[in-house]
Image (cartoon, rainbow, N blue to C red):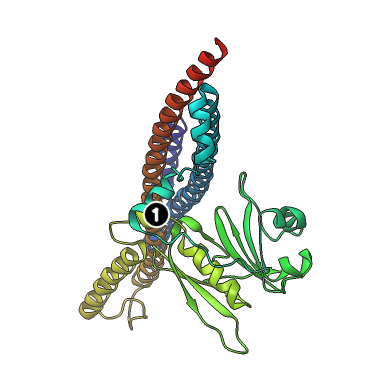
Amino acid sequence: KIYFEWIFAESSLNGAFRTQMTSQNLTYEDKYRHIARDTERRMEDTIAMANQCNDLGDQTLAMLAIDREKLLRVDQDLDFINSSLQRAEYHLHSMESWGGAIGNYFRGQPKPERSGTLAAKHARKHNVDEKAPPCPPSVWRGSKLNEMKVQKFMEDSKLHSFFDGEYVMYLCSNAGARASVSKACADCVVLTNLRAFEISAGKRVVADGKNKDFALRSVECAELIKGTLMKYDRVRISMWGGRTYDLSFWNRKSSLFMLWVFNRIPVNSRKWNGIPSVESGNASREVRKARAVASGARSGNISEPVEGESEIQKMAREHNARIDDHLDDLSAILDNVAFKAKMIGDEVREQNKLTKHINERVEETHVRLKASDKRGRKLLRR
């Protein structure tokens, strides 16, 4: 309904515009000026719509990341359930017969089962080193974050606007290991379950001249750039899209630990197997540049005034320059939209794998629970 109302409004506007153009005795310059303004207005509306799609992609990726956190938590909870079920089976074996009790006495307590999470299976399959470096005191996590009320302080100080379901996982203080929460939050690197960013002197650091944070789902790898006596260590984060972000750490132990954390972000399966957005944008810009050079070779440089040109030629030259700028902006936005659409598809595919894995584990746990329940009922009937 909204679409057809928009079409009707556009057609009515165009009809009124054509009636006005024909009913008035306008010069060719005035007619061209009106047409150029209308074309630029349509281009600006298209760019605004593309920006809305880009923002919607950010929100969708954030919601998918939160959903993934919930699925991972369920997968981890199944480890606890299976461990409890293993202890129940151990005690049932002791209660069923004297031989079982004597055997359990000599065997001792059951050994913990290997983790059955999807991440643990992937690590065993690819021989990934799961051992983390020691966590230094300057890196706050878990109960330390709750004790210092870091998230509430950051919200009250307006240092970060949290999404629903977003929470702080790590805070690396660059103000010292025993700094207060106000000093630590004024100079730190923060890693949430969705994003990562740096705060210096109580203000968010602009990483690439535009963005103040980056999504964890976009991280490809991280590398350590060692500092000197007067400079902090830096961890350079490389994105699948080609961008890089530098995060500063005052302590070598902190930088090594956070380097391990960033390299452990499971995004290897989310690589875009096509042309990355930055390369696509560069390719389209190179094509437009080649066309402009070829056109300039035929008719001179269209961006510079031409001696003896008419008023319409001048307006056409300026209009074409503005349209080219708009097309560059639109191309960059659409590249980002396409890249995020691919990331959304990859994320949904990975979550489907995780859901299937959880369903299989739930079925196995259900079979074990049913067998233990049968054994327990048999004991009660004795």
Residue drawn at (49%, 19%), measured in percent from left and top? 375
Tell me the SS state at disc 1.
helix
Please name the residue shown 52% across and 42% down the image: 76
> Which quadrant is the C terminus positioned in?
top right
Q: Can residue 342 be seen in this snapshot?
A: yes
Residue 237 pos. (x, y %): 47, 69
Residue under the image location 43 percent in, 35 percent down: 358
Which residue corresponds to mark 1? 123
In the figure, is residue 313 to the left or right of 46?
left
Disc 1 marks which amino acid?
Answer: Ala
Residue 148 image offset from top left, x and y in percent? 76, 58
Q: Tell me if I can see residue 67 in this picture.
A: no
For the N terminus, the quadrant is top left
Image coordinates of residue 136 in percent, x first then y, are 64, 69
**Against 294, is 87 above or below?**
above
Estimate how packed mark 1 is, as few (under 14), some (14 to 19) or many (20 or more) residues with alpha carbons within 10 Å.
few
Closest to the observer, 243 or 348: 348
> Residue 168: where, in percent of width, then height?
64, 55
Foreground residue, 156 or 1?
156
